[in-house]
Amino acid sequence: MKILITGGAGFIGSNLCEYFLDKNYQVVCLDNFATGHRYNLAAFIDNSNFTLLEGDIRNLTDCRRAVDGVDYVLHQAALGSVPRSINDPITTNDVNVSGFLNMLSASRDAKVKRFVYAASSSTYGDSVGLPKVEDVIGKPLSPYAITKYANELYADIFSKTYGLETIGLRYFNVFGRKQDPNGAYAAVIPKFVMQFMNYESPVINGDGNYSRDFTYIDNVIQMNELAMTTQNPEAINTVYNTAYGDRTTLTQLVNLLKENLSAFDTKIRNVEVIHGPNRAGDIPHSLASIEKAKKLLGYQPQFSIQEGLKAAVSWYYNNLKQ
């Protein structure tokens, strides 16, 4: 089997590359290294089953070159981050919508068997109900959320109009090894870990009561594999929450991080936390129902927030400590 993983040099993409190479798949990685890193590919760059294509999903020619001879596409390439999309909605739209449409079109023309793509929990927007159920969404709260919802609409049309099998995975706050702690749009967990390790006070946006369904990378890998390989006709051409199904407040998260990091460095226990204003475009609470994925895909997440943080913190400390 030959898989194309777009955004394969990124956090989630590189973990998917590594996992499927270990299972003896042929893996093609397409990345323009705008947010991905070559060092994420270092462990398998010389693997004979691995092909790196440097290209951009905004270029249809690059997309067509990447899908040539491919059985499945795992589309991870995107410009993430709500704040980034607020600061630069045009580039976010170009990558996440135009680039997505290029990949769908190229995949249709190459007759790939299935197109599995990274959707987002941001699609739930101002919907206040918890847990989040796939068929009940609100209005988007950011340009990023609009682009990810547009992806779902395009995927649905391509399934119905052209017969391309598609499955969207609405990621909920994924974390784990290889997640970049640096940059203006770094995710909260690696950013806080790096700050704690440097004895710097992390800033919580708001009073710390906002909550998220933090989801460890291995749960996300499982969902991608199930979505790619399922033979259940009811499971195709739809979207799934990709999460653990539990929520953790930012205050609880900080306490768990300090507890895990203090096992490596007791001084971290004394680092204070600062509270800042709430961030524009943020939803207050996020919690996924994973019943649909359990029923149709057989999904059984293996890592809770506690288990995932223990594994992630160990990786961060051993790999990121200056």
Image (cartoon, rainbow, N blue to C red):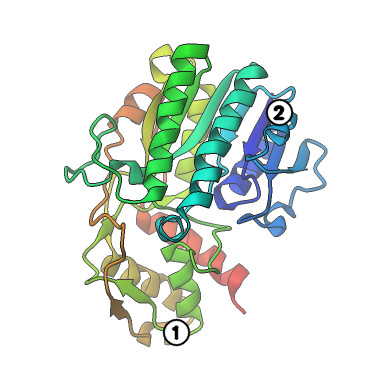
Q: What is the x, y in percent for residue 312?
A: 49, 60
| Residue nearest the viewer, comparing 266 with 220 | 220
Looking at the rendered structure, the kind of residue marked 1 is: Glu
Q: Nearer the viewer, residue 83 or 24?
A: 83
In this rendering, would 210 be left or right of 97?
A: left
Q: At x 36% / y 87%, what residue is drawn? A: 270
Secondary structure, mark 1, is loop
Look at the picture and state if 122 lies above or below 296.
below
* Label 2 sits on residue: 64
Residue located at (27% from left, 73% from top) = 277
Q: Quadrant of residue 86?
A: bottom left
Q: Which is in the foreground here, disc 1 or disc 2?
A: 2
Distance CA(mark 1)–CA(mark 2)? 46 Å
Q: Position of residue 202 (x, y in %)?
A: 39, 77
Q: Is residue 45 visible?
A: yes
**Earlier sequence position, callout 1 versus callout 2:** 2
Q: Residue at x 29, y 66 (%)?
A: 250
Residue 59 percent coordinates (x, y): 68, 38
Give the vertical position of 105 relative to 263 (above or below).
Answer: above
| Helix, strand or loop at mark 2 | helix
User: Where does residue 318 sit, x and y in percent of width and height?
Assistant: 60, 70
Q: Please state which of residues 267 and 121 is positioned toward the viewer in this rendering.
A: 121
Which residue extends farthest left?
129
Q: Which mark is residue 5?
A: none
Location of the N terminus (image quadrant): top right
Q: Residue furthest front?
A: 90
Tell me the number on the disc at residue 200.
1
- Left or right, 212 with respect to 54, comes to left
Q: Amino acid at mark 2?
A: Arg
